[in-house]
Amino acid sequence: MRIAIAQFNAHIGNFSGNLEKMLKMTAEAKAQKADIICFPELATCGYPARDFLEFDDFIRQSDAAIQTLAEAARGIAIVVGSPTRNPQPEGKDLYNSVYFLADGAIQYVQHKTLLPTYDVFDEYRYFQPASEWGIVTYQGKRIALTVCEDIWNVGNENPLYTICPMDEMMAAKPELMLNVSASPFSCDHAPERIHVIRANVERYKVPIFYVNHVGAQTELLFDGGSVVMSPSGEVFDEMPFFEECLRVYELDEVMAGGKQVAQPIEKTMLMHDALVMGVRDYFQKLGLKKAILGLSGGIDSAVTCVLAARALGADNVRVILMPSQYSSDHSVNDARHLAENLGVQYDLVPIEPMYAAFAEALKPHFWGYPANITEENLQARIRGMLLMGFSNKFGPILLNTSNKSEMAVGYGTLYGDMCGGLSVLGDVYKTEVYELANYINKDGEVIPQSSIVKPPSAELRPGQKDSDSLPEYDILDRVLFQYIEKHQGPKEIIAMGFDEALVRRVLRLVNINEFKRHQTAPVLRVSSKAFGMGRRLPIVGKYLS
Amino acid sequence: MRIAIAQFNAHIGNFSGNLEKMLKMTAEAKAQKADIICFPELATCGYPARDFLEFDDFIRQSDAAIQTLAEAARGIAIVVGSPTRNPQPEGKDLYNSVYFLADGAIQYVQHKTLLPTYDVFDEYRYFQPASEWGIVTYQGKRIALTVCEDIWNVGNENPLYTICPMDEMMAAKPELMLNVSASPFSCDHAPERIHVIRANVERYKVPIFYVNHVGAQTELLFDGGSVVMSPSGEVFDEMPFFEECLRVYELDEVMAGGKQVAQPIEKTMLMHDALVMGVRDYFQKLGLKKAILGLSGGIDSAVTCVLAARALGADNVRVILMPSQYSSDHSVNDARHLAENLGVQYDLVPIEPMYAAFAEALKPHFWGYPANITEENLQARIRGMLLMGFSNKFGPILLNTSNKSEMAVGYGTLYGDMCGGLSVLGDVYKTEVYELANYINKDGEVIPQSSIVKPPSAELRPGQKDSDSLPEYDILDRVLFQYIEKHQGPKEIIAMGFDEALVRRVLRLVNINEFKRHQTAPVLRVSSKAFGMGRRLPIVGKYLS
């Protein structure tokens, strides 16, 4: 038996596009004499389809896609995830299901049992868990079908769940397992994935074919990394990260094992590649080509610019340099050098005339009040307005350049430097932005060295430095990581040896700035806890604030 | 037996503030010789506490509040909602529980069974459902304790759930039920609430004391409307909407019935009062007093301004009139008249000098390109910048004035008129804004009549009218309502008799403008489906778009 794994980039709600690509991949697999082709979880409609799932029309279109795929399943079986209506009067309206299509018809449907409802996942919002389990027999082979999270509770290791669906299926003595997944990327996810698949192989003594989504769904990035594991626990194959891929495997060879494949998993490289894919796919799925951003001479906009040029091509990236009277010469020069190094179009628009017009209009109202953050925000907002002007006039999408450290503590201007359709670095701490910059420069200077080595500054008043307002980033980022990624409270973080006043100040800043993050662009998610859909906090609370 | 109902306004995470108020209300109830006082669901920590629930420190503080309340429960029993840790190694970490505190100690804890996970609710994200049910006996009375949704599946009427916890409790023959709730307001919610409580009374033949939250938690509004229902199904009392309230009831009198109380539920009045409370409580909980907004002379900013003045007092509202060369004289006059009618401070800041500065700076870059939406957006953004300048300099929070119809179809400028810390009318369709305006003027002109009767216009180019770009609002709003509130697809809406091209265009506009709504202020929720946390859609999808 030959099994094809289709590491597939679905587009949410694009039924015709998804179907066309699935039919093409099925034809290819058939040409390679595959007996079965596997597509990922909810591949017909895309993952996560979110509240589109609540529309009957959306489910009708998913069902229609399954019918078309069933028609195409002749001479090859198709395994594919799609929503299914729950025929019972009670419980949620839908199941999250995997279909086994063969001989022109639906042969079997297995529903998902373990429904992740945490972080970025909302599956219990839509789906009823399975309460029946079976297997499918095809060409004499007994095959267990599982959906993503269903394999993440093997041996009841995962404290969230009280049931393990594959334990139920073992009664029917399956000879192999096909798992259809939609498991989002984070920098530390790949080893966990291998660990869990191996735990299943060791418990059930069957080979596992694990197929994952690839591509970006706005903030959620899928890395692929689909895995074929032999009963020995050896990784027979691990598909490449961040690209669509179709491969066919001979089951006998997988059974025999003797191979041990591993993709490189160096963190900064993964982060870099994930962000490039995230930017590229955001534009591709929107049917757009061109991006614009402001280049300050600092490291955040420099790294964002390089990632954009790599994702879209230098010809499709345009940058605007918008110095004020507080901008240093070296900042403008650094920005220009970067643009020249990359070959992206750049223009200079000094902001002083607009600033003067605002200052003049506001003078009678602000008279007697000293200059403060207001005047700094005006500068940031003039830049945001100029960039949005270019965006509106010529069509490029504005990329936001804020990093995770800034977003965490609210060190940014709403409607100013927080503008943009997509936040590229919003899940990358400042200290990680430096790592990305050095990674980008590993084979020669792309980002001017002075952008990397100079002290960070917003340059909104003379001689300003980030460290005037914030702790040094190496300390700040470690406190933020404990609070955001690790859910540690003040007591626990202080007990790690951080200064108490600093910890309380940082946590307070994070909490009182929730209102700013509420209004920001979607953030490409590369960590286990990103700002956005996976982190839901009240705005008007009074906790650590 | 005398039972006190404390219709309570909790503040999320403000443990000391919530506790102080609960102790004060408990003392008051005791002074009125109450035997039991009931606070709402999760009253110790506030509802919805969202991901704060994932912090151990947050749960420790909830537990500490329960301990303090238990100490205070001497001579009176306290019924109160609070999270409880799940001691089992499997399942979610927490229960959503109701505590019965008496004689200085925790006497009984009942966990919630039915965990709403739809619309604005995420309870399955945090909580494990109850699997055991009991009752508590106090002063010889057998009392059933239920939490909110637990009474919403009586007789398995609600198709979402497969279990009905009160059916289980009936084995112990309870004589009355206390239900602690956190049931958010929407304009049509009050009759549903009475209907459900009555269905429970009819099934179980016991009186029900239903206590609800009141107050605003950013976008979620709680109206109170706590209900005491006699075993006859008569409403013995319904507490006032939108205000904190403590009342004590003699159980024998409730048992006897013979009263039939009803609060008025006229839709526009409820919407008005809910929005006033929403604005007021947002500011009170943030510890702020002052608001600012731009007044255009149009109906949306006029209604927002009246609601703000009623919520905060005219002295605490400041408005800025920012005419351009396209603003009609009557608009400026209407805005000025409204400000004078209300007695709010107003200033005039014409935007032309700033517009000229931007036009000049952009001229070399835009040369050869015709004026388009870019120039209209520049005007809206200059206004946003000016308002944010006042906000930053003097501290008032900017109120957003966009209505639901505009937000739905993206008829607004990101970082322009979409600026603001709180969206007052974002869940109010344009046709409902007119209803609010007429309601406000019911006893005499507050909003100038010409603001109400003139054709809606953004006044961003000469002679512009909303109807140049959009269908008439009475048609648009009906299509939007079917799509947003009723989850109807194109097929169903067209079948109702709406023009097919119009329907497809409107639905497409809603879907492609998700990116704008992603970056807007929290919206005060008054309908059954508001933009924001209760409506979660992909940004990069391709569905009806």
Image (cartoon, coloured by chain):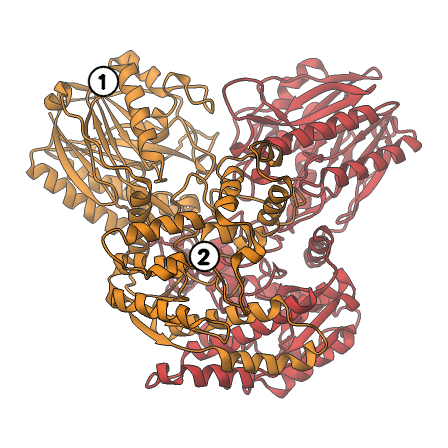
Chain colours: A red, B orange
Task: Name the subunit of mark 2.
Answer: B
**A127 lies left or right of A145:** left
Residue B304 in the image: above or below residue B61 = below
Label number found at residue A392: none
Tell me where residue A348 sits by quadrant.
bottom right
Tell me where residue A344 sits by quadrant.
bottom right
Q: How many marks?
A: 2
Q: Are marks 2 and 1 in contact (CB under 8 Å)?
A: no
Amino acid type, callout 1:
Val
Residue B243 in the image: above or below residue A336 = above
Q: Nearer the viewer, residue A176 or B437?
A: B437
Q: Residues within 10 Å of mark 1 (few under 14, many from 20)?
A: many
Residue on which the image places disc 1: B206
For the C terminus of chain A, the quadrant is bottom left
**B443 lies left or right of B84:** left
Residue A364 in the image: above or below residue B488 = below
For the N terminus of chain A, the quadrant is top right
Q: Position of residue A453 (x, y in %)?
A: 63, 77
Task: Name the subunit of mark 1.
Answer: B
Label 2: state its secondary structure: loop
Examine the rendering and report whether any part of residue A464 can be seen.
no
Q: CA distance from mark 2 to mark 1?
A: 46 Å
Q: Which-is-in-front pick, marks 2 and 1?
A: 2
Q: Position of residue A206 (x, y in %)?
A: 75, 24
Q: Residue at x 57, y 48 (%)?
A: B510
Amino acid type, callout 2:
Ser
Label number found at residue B402: 2
Q: Residues within 10 Å of mark 2 (few under 14, many from 20)?
A: many
Q: Nearer the viewer, residue B128 or A308?
A: A308
Q: Residue at x 15, y 19 (%)?
A: B255
